Amino acid sequence: MRISFFGGTREVTGSNFLIESAGKLILFDCGLFQGSKSSEERNYSPFPYDASKIDFVIVCHAHLDHTGRLPKLAREGFRGKIFATAPTKELAELVLDDSEKLMEEKAERENVQPLYEKGDIERILELFETISYDETVEVSPGIKLTLKNAGHILGSAFAVLEADGICLTYTSDLGNVPSLLLNPPEHITSADYIICESTYGGRIHEDVAKRKTKLAEIINNTTRQNGVLMIPSFAIERTQELLHDIEDFCSIEGCEKPTFYLDSPLAQKATALFSKYPEYLSSTIRKSHRDNNFFGLERIHLTNTVEESKQIELAPNPKVIIAGSGMMNGGRILHHLLNFAEDGKNSILIVGYQAQGTLGRRIFEGHREVKIYGKKVVVNAQVKSIGSYSAHADMPQLIDWLSYSKNVKRIFLTHGEVDQQLTLAGKIKLELGKQVIIPQMGEYHDLY
């Protein structure tokens, strides 16, 4: 068995790993590179393998940095099978459709060729074969696949691949514990090799129990100042957790003020899937919401059209606007920043990872002058963050999860910036005594 690393190496985005085993070529994920302009340009580069010769793709969850180049793979000749959970397939369709629309708008604006078109997405969706958690499938003679709950987003999984007498586990992204919506990641007790994410490999998250208090303080401050609170949020999981916490807040405070807006058609569609797949949610939330009304949407103003989105600017303060994209590198949040970021009584609340090179990262790091659609914007709004909304495991959680596999020969760290990976690697060696490799782009390793 051979692993080649073609994305998500010493960076967070672009996950793409090639497995050669039992005469077959298998990909773990096929994600977009995101962040700086140079990162995005890499998406147009040819794959470092012949797409038409790939037999299978294992997609562990629907985020763009794990699925965003699947249509390009189809455009370049891939016609094999794609294995994923049912929620992942449906969420991937939503995410890819939304991404294609943004790419088309950018192509028209900048006179460039889009990375792929609607037909490429339709071709990819025909190749999906859905499987459930803990269902072992023989994808080819001598190759077995099991998907297990990763606790990251709805339907997210980590993959256990057995072939050539080797058990290889790929975490994709592991969830932050505890989650309001999802059960914690399953554990495995046996693996020869593990490809492990390291997004927050050097950090310890804030206490989840305190986040509702912090959110309430920020919302109340917005109300007192008659201001605008902008929350750039990922459409899947982060938005739903925010909606759940807002519902809790409103049930106590009454919420006559401020007005809440969910200005993201993608997030609205994703939220509906949580009700469609309650079996993928935590047992706790299913017991407390037997009617499948998890998010109190009757309190939220849902905006679908561009015209409805524009009307938010004219609506009276105070108001809270949840809009994509989560890293502020596109979407409707940019228009709200143009309208409200220069006013000191307003706030920007960051609740998710901000990749290097993104507008969100610059604002998070304190840059007070940024450009949005070519216009200079002075960020006078207060910038707040709540780290415990992260959907990624932190360092103690990663160490705990890895500790259950006693006989691991090697751990490969991916999906993380180098400083996070080095910290986590040192901790793994110190506490678990395991060999750790931080692969570079294009590096390969033979497994025995």
Image: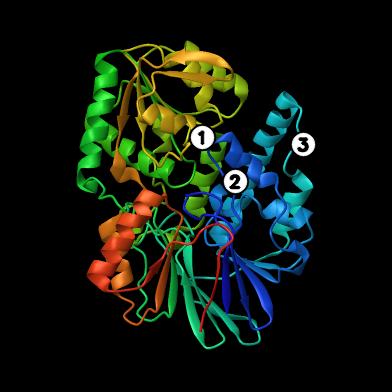
Decide: marks 3, 1 in contact (CB < 8 A)?
no
Q: Amino acid at mark 1?
A: Ser
Q: Is residue 305 left or right of residue 81?
A: left
Q: Which mark is residue 113?
A: 3
Under circle 1, the secondary element is: loop
Under circle 3, the secondary element is: loop
Q: Amino acid at mark 3?
A: Gln
Q: Which mark is residue 325?
A: 1
Q: In the image shown, does 76 or 313 lie closer to the viewer?
A: 76
Q: Earlier in the sequence, mark 3 or mark 2?
A: 2
Looking at the rendering, which quadrant does residue 40 occupy? top right
Crowd tier of the residue under label 3, counting other residues whose Cα lies within 10 Å: few below 14, some 14–19, many 20 or above:
few
On the image, the x and y values in percent for residue 25 come to: 67, 73
Q: Which mark is residue 95?
A: 2
Residue drawn 36% across the image and 14% down it: 380
From the image, which quarter does the N terminus lie in? bottom right
How many numbered tags mark residues here? 3
On the image, the x and y values in percent for residue 343 come to: 37, 11
Gap in Å between the C-alphas at discs 3 and 1? 22 Å
